[in-house]
Amino acid sequence: MQVMRLGRTISAAVRFAVSSAVVMTLGAFATPARAGSEAADFPPGAFTDGGHYDLHSLRGKVVVLFFFEESCPTCRGTIPERNKLVEQYKDKPVKFIAIDPGHPINDSIAYTKETKLVMPVYPDPLRVMEGRWGEHISLRNIYQFKVIDAEGNVAAQRLEDIPAIVAKATWKYKDKGYNAKLNPAIDAFEWNQYVAGMRLLKPLLKDRNKAVVDDAQKLLADIKTEVEQWKADADKAAEDKPIEAYDLYTHVAAVLAGDELGKSVEEPLKKLKANKAVKDELGARLMFEQVAGVMSKAKSEQKATVAQFCRSIAKKYPGTPTSEKATALATELGGGA
């Protein structure tokens, strides 16, 4: 199948991360997101900075989406102004992400290099994200902003509204007075990159500066409290919601690898891996990964092929959360029955 061959050629660096975020918030929206409604999330795909973003993992922070017309010289001329806006909010709980409708990732990467745009860009060659937000970016509509509040709802479309919306968002750790040496780890934790955060925090637990060690231990205690809640939630969900429990236990094991709390989930994870619902969902995710790789490089004439492959996921793994997402995406792509 064409999409299968395409999927295998995509670099692992730009593939969609298989994580709890995949399960929780990748749903397609039947109607464009409007003010006060839940914000439409990114379809499968890649970002120009190699990162992976979804609105569930950014919950608690403000997200500003910048839709732009790549071929418009006027829009290109505003990029320094956009960069100043990002710089203005660099110490605030807000993330700026650009959307490049109608262009594959290579074009988006070239654009960011030429213009020095400092936002990560989501290439939207099949215009799925554009459709979810009810926009058609063109030379007549060269850019649009969408502001998403800390609760994950559409809050505004004007830059003038950003300060008031950001004022309602808070940091979890940054304002607790930790030693500045912990800032890289804290920044990772703030943006829900817990594995990376732990990798940065561990060396500081053995720092020569006692003040740094003391603060590192305090931060670790805060993180463990949060992780303990994940485990408690997983324990409650294990019987009736095995997929949700599996994702939470996996997250605990990854963040606190080698720690007693991390080791404590090995047995329940082993049990859940044998659960049919979990096995089917993991199988569906593996197939859906290929869609993510293809979407960032796809051409408009490949819509039907991608949609057909999405429907094959639903056929092979019916009733799984990922098969439902795949079916919804196929509908968005206009792939027929």
Image (cartoon, helix red, strand yellow):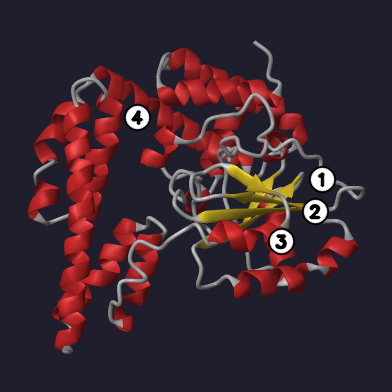
Q: Which residue type carries mark 2?
A: Tyr
Q: Is residue 142 among what the camera can see?
A: yes
Find the distance from the CA under tag 1 to the CA under tag 3. Answer: 21 Å
Q: Earlier in the sequence, mark 2 or mark 3?
A: 2
Q: Nearer the viewer, mark 1 or mark 4?
A: 1
Disc 2 element: strand
Q: Earlier in the sequence, mark 1 or mark 3?
A: 1
Find the distance from the CA under tag 3 to the CA under tag 4. Answer: 43 Å
Q: Which residue type carries mark 4?
A: Leu
Q: Which residue type carries mark 1?
A: Ile
Tell me whether circle 1 and circle 2 mark residues in contact (CB < 8 Å): yes
Residue linked to disc 1: 137
Residue linked to disc 2: 143
Relative height, residue 226 to residue 172 (above, below): above
Crowd around label 4: few <14 · some 14–19 · many ≥20 (10 Å):
some
The residue at the far top in this view is 337
Disc 3 element: helix
Q: Earlier in the sequence, mark 1 or mark 4?
A: 1
The residue at the far bottom in this view is 209
Q: Residue 255: where, in percent of width, then height?
A: 24, 54
Q: Nearer the viewer, mark 2 or mark 3?
A: 3
Residue at point 15% right, 78% down? 214
Find the distance from the CA under tag 4 to the CA under tag 2. Answer: 38 Å
Residue linked to disc 4: 282
Residue linked to disc 3: 160
Q: Nearer the viewer, mark 4 or mark 2?
A: 2
Tell me whether circle 4 and circle 2 mark residues in contact (CB < 8 Å): no
Q: Earlier in the sequence, mark 4 or mark 2?
A: 2
Q: Quadrant of residue 82?
A: bottom right
Residue at point 47% right, 51% down? 58
Tell me whether circle 3 and circle 4 mark residues in contact (CB < 8 Å): no
